[in-house]
Amino acid sequence: MHKDLKKILVDEKKIEDICLKLASKINQDYKGKKPIIIGVLKGCQPFMSDLLKKLDLDCELDYIVCSSYVGASSSGFVELKKDVQLSVKERDVILIEDIVDTGRTLKMLEEIFKTRHVKSFEVVVLFDKKAARIADFNPKYVGMEIGNDFIVGYGLDYNENYRNLPYVGILKENIY
């Protein structure tokens, strides 16, 4: 375990099990369809990579970059830094995100994609931190609900650190 962590919250085996469970649901819901899967960078990268390997459907991939955090706190403002390249009009869109906490970013993205006349729009998150929710947003596919701890690892970061950990842990308060 990394020295800056209080404890490991989700180990590699549990992450793999979550990916299998989510992929099974997505495979059922999108059977015979060809969705565009859009990752919200940077945090989605390990989760999206592992989830994609378990999907048994044709799909296209794209990425989007948003920012709303400064250090450990939400700025309250969501900035779209990089938009998708593919046309999403009349397409099924699945957005992949590492975590939903305040819900502001995902609510904003949902509104943006609806104005682009998508056929459908759903969100897959590894973690749902409902205790931090401000915006009225609930993803369809949730890997695991968690408490209001500050977590890092497996794509989740604090000031760009810890993304490479193969598990998710709770960061010690004195670090942030």
Image: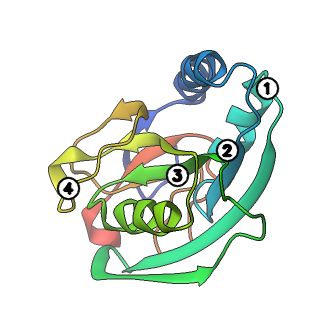
Please state which amino acid type lies under the numbered disc 1: Leu
- For disc 4, the neighbor class at 10 Å (few under 14, some 14 to 19, many from 20) is some
Amino acid type for the residue under numbered disc 4: Arg
In the image, is 127 to the left or to the right of 102? right
Q: CA distance from mark 4 to mark 1?
A: 32 Å
Label 1: which residue? 57
Measured in 3D between alpha carbons, the distance from the residue under mark 3 to the one under mark 4, in whole angstroms, is 15 Å
In front: label 4 or label 1: 1
Relative to the observer, which residue lies in front, 51 or 8? Answer: 51
The answer to which of marks 2 and 4 sits earlier in the sequence is: 2
Determine the CA span between mark 1 and mark 3: 19 Å
Quadrant for residue 144, please give it.
Answer: top left
Numbered label attached to residue 97: 3
- Locate the C terminus and report the quarter of the image it occupies: bottom left
| Residue type at tag 2 | Met
Labels 1, 2: front one: 1
Q: Which residue is mark 2?
A: 48
Q: Amino acid at mark 3?
A: Glu
Q: Of helix, strand and loop, which one carries label 1?
A: loop
Sooner in the amino-acid sequence: mark 1 or mark 3: 1
Disc 4 to disc 1: CB gap under 8 Å:
no
Where residue 123 sits: x, y (%)?
Answer: 48, 44
Determine which residue is flagged by label 4: 133
Residue at the (58%, 54%) spot, across then down: 118
List x then y, in percent, for residue 115: 48, 68
